[in-house]
Amino acid sequence: TTRQVLAGPTAFFRAMPVRGGIGSPLLYGVILGWAGAVAAGFYQALFHSIVGTSLAEALQRLLDPSAVPSPTAVSAFLEGWGGFLLQAVFGGVAAAIGLMIAAGIVHLALLVLGGAGRGFEATLSVVCYSEATCVLFLLPFCGQLLGSIWALVLWVIGLAQAQRISYGKAIAAVLLPLVVFCCCCGAVI
């Protein structure tokens, strides 16, 4: 499945069943999303171990180990091996929730644009099978960036094929939530 999604996404998403349950696509997405999160967490923890924490933070821990952890210390924990352990343990649940939320947001954009004719199941399947790009997370340094960009491309291809809409409408459905988010952030600032 991963090879088909990455090597021939147009044919895969055109032939992909859009009815019959969300179990298989969701399981696929959770497994690959979890594996990608663990790989990215491992590289982040490894990098953090090599670079280390700041000298001031280390001195503070030595002088007063009972002090309330600063936001920097919590961030250091999450970026280090503690965060890796959390991703390994809870990554599957986080992946399932993230896939459902992402598919819901994209499907809402499709509804606004009039491109959701084949239903939420088709959108969720596209988002889940696009997790195939998480195999790129195994590449250190650039894998996460490359995988994330390729996933957005797969969303566009997948939505166009699965929902039987134009590529323009698929691009708009993927970019609309990002534009709305940026506008909301701009309004808050």
Image: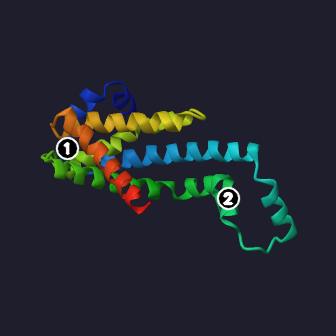
Q: Position of residue 15 (x, y in %)?
A: 21, 32
> Could you say whether the residue bearing mark 2 is in a helix, strand or loop?
helix
User: Can residue 159 be seen in the rendering of this structure?
Assistant: no
Three-letter amino acid code of the residue under disc 1: Val
Which residue lies under the disc numbered 2?
A: 77
Q: Position of residue 177 (x, y in %)?
A: 31, 50
Residue at the outermost top position: 7
Three-letter amino acid code of the residue under disc 2: Phe
Label ID, residue 56? none
| Image point (75%, 43%), residue name | 50
How did the renderer colour the structure? rainbow
Q: Earlier in the sequence, mark 1 or mark 2?
A: 1
| Image point (69%, 42%), residue name | 47
Q: Nearer the viewer, residue 61 or 97?
A: 61
Q: Nearer the viewer, residue 135 or 142?
A: 142
How far is the residue under mark 1 from the one under mark 2?
41 Å
Compared across the picture, whether 144 is left or right of 108 comes to right
Residue at the outermost right position: 63
**Neighbour class for label 2 at 10 Å: few (<14), some, many (≥20)?**
some
Label ID, residue 18? 1
* Whether label 1 touches label 2, CB < 8 Å: no
> Could you say whether the residue bearing mark 1 is in a helix, strand or loop?
loop
Compared across the picture, whether 146 is left or right of 73 comes to left
| Image point (57%, 53%), residue name | 88
